[in-house]
Amino acid sequence: MIFSAPFLNYFTPQHRFTTFATVIAFLLGFSLPTSNVLMHFLLVLALLCVFLRPNRHFIKILAKNPLVWLPAVLFLLLLLSLLTQYDVYGVKMIYKYKKLLFILPLSLFFLMSRSLSKQFVKGFLLANAIILFTSFLIWEFDLPLGTAYLSNPTVFKMHITQNFFMALAVLIWLQQTFHHKGIKSGGYALLTCLGVYNIFFMVQGRTGYLALVVAFFTWIFLSCSKVHQLRMIIVALILGAVLVIVPNKANVRMHTAIKEIQTCLAASQPNLLEACDTSMGLRTIFALRSWQLIKEAPILGHGAGAFEHVSKQGNFIIHNPHNEYLIQTLQSGLLGLTVFLVWMWCFFRSACQHPSEIKNMFIAVLMSYMACHFFNSFLLDSSEGHLFVILTAILASRSVHFKTPHHNQKNVDIGIH
């Protein structure tokens, strides 16, 4: 024969399908920090892959996984609330939270091959590397690019999203720095340092500060020996002291946040709206006023879009309360908040089933999300919310490998490797 069997395998329908799924996974990771339109298009293609390669056996297994059905319950609570208290913005909220229903089909997609999750991460890292390089070009040469400008060199997304995603990318680059040796280790170390500099000194996004600090300390606590932990903590404290003492953009942004909160809390009733019309001021007044509504309906909440009642009481309109815990409690009550927190706990427990490197990374990312949820509604937001949904789907798909009996392990990848 002129062509060998391995060569001919490249032209089989199964190999073409594998290549198609791999490209989708890579581009899906790439699209999250870059384009919502591309992200939604790729999600449709991922669902198409699942439709073309359905597997009822794994659908039943995944449907019993709390990582899959808990988010669905959270969505169902919001949907049912429209029956008792219909609100126009509540319908919009339902539409924004529909991503919670994507976990089951995305789990089936990533179950096709474990390499798909690796391709997803590679795409995510490549996008952040391009964003990092472009951000430095804007900052250094004052290049006109969209809405970016010298004092806030964002590229594709708003500063909150870019800084948060960059913090997660820095965490992975840091892990890869210790994982590799030689030139690769040096390259990842350089990306890590440039990413940290970009987050703290270039882009205006306090969320990135919090995400990076929480992820960093979580990761070193889980990954490093006590000696390395002590060394890295000392280095981090020294850098933190420099940030506090030496005038810089991060220092100014943190002082501004504290001042905004103090100004809002000290304002009298007639001047309250004007005094709290700032980033942290709106977060503060929303948190204070939402407690009264929570007391009125503590168990089941006020339904989808309930936070609009808070803004109407204060004569200001806010479509994003920037606090995931409060928004869940306001809309679905303590029942919804409990479902949400149990979902986070199941995410943690599922991550603990994996090898240490993967476990530590997932837990560090989870802790970043949970810390940032105090100042952002990341499940409501498109890019950040879809990323967490995808990470949940990856964990759910990997859990099948642990629950499937040993003699059936060869069938877990549904024929795609």
Image (cartoon, rainbow, N blue to C red):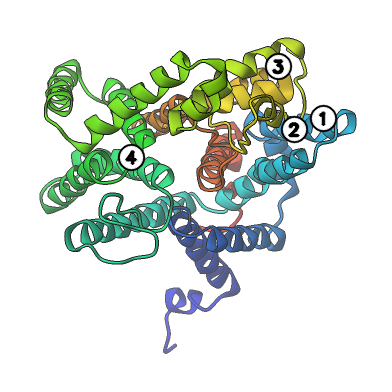
Mark 1 to mark 2 CA distance (whole Å)? 6 Å
Q: For the point 44% across and 73% down, which residue is it? A: 6
Say if mark 1 contacts mark 2, CB within 8 Å: yes
Q: Which residue is mark 1?
A: 81
Under tag 4, what secondary structure? helix
Packing grade of label 2 (10 A; few <14, some 14-19, many >=20) is many
| Precedes in sequence: disc 1 or disc 2 | 1
Q: Are marks 2 and 3 in contact (CB under 8 Å)?
A: no
Spatial CA distance of label 4 from label 3 is: 34 Å
Cα–Cα span, label 3 and label 1: 16 Å
> Are the residues tagged 1 and 4 within 8 Å (C-beta)?
no
What amino acid type is highlighted by mark number 4? Answer: Ala
Amino acid under disc 3? Leu
In the foreground, 317 or 207 = 317
Label 4 vs 3, first from the N-terminus = 4
Quadrant location, the N terminus = bottom left
Q: Which residue is mark 3?
A: 293
* Residue tagged 2: 304
Q: Residues within 10 Å of mark 1 (few under 14, many from 20)?
A: many
Under mark 2, the amino acid is Ala
Q: Nearer the viewer, residue 135 or 291?
A: 291
Q: Residue at x 29, y 33 (%)?
A: 253
Indicate which disc, 3 or 1, sits on the residue closer to the N terminus: 1
Q: Nearer the viewer, mark 2 or mark 3?
A: 3
Q: Is residue 79 left or right of residue 146?
A: right
Dot 3, how many residues are within 10 Å of its Cα: few (below 14), some (14-19), or many (20+)?
some
Q: Position of residue 379 (x, y in %)?
A: 58, 37
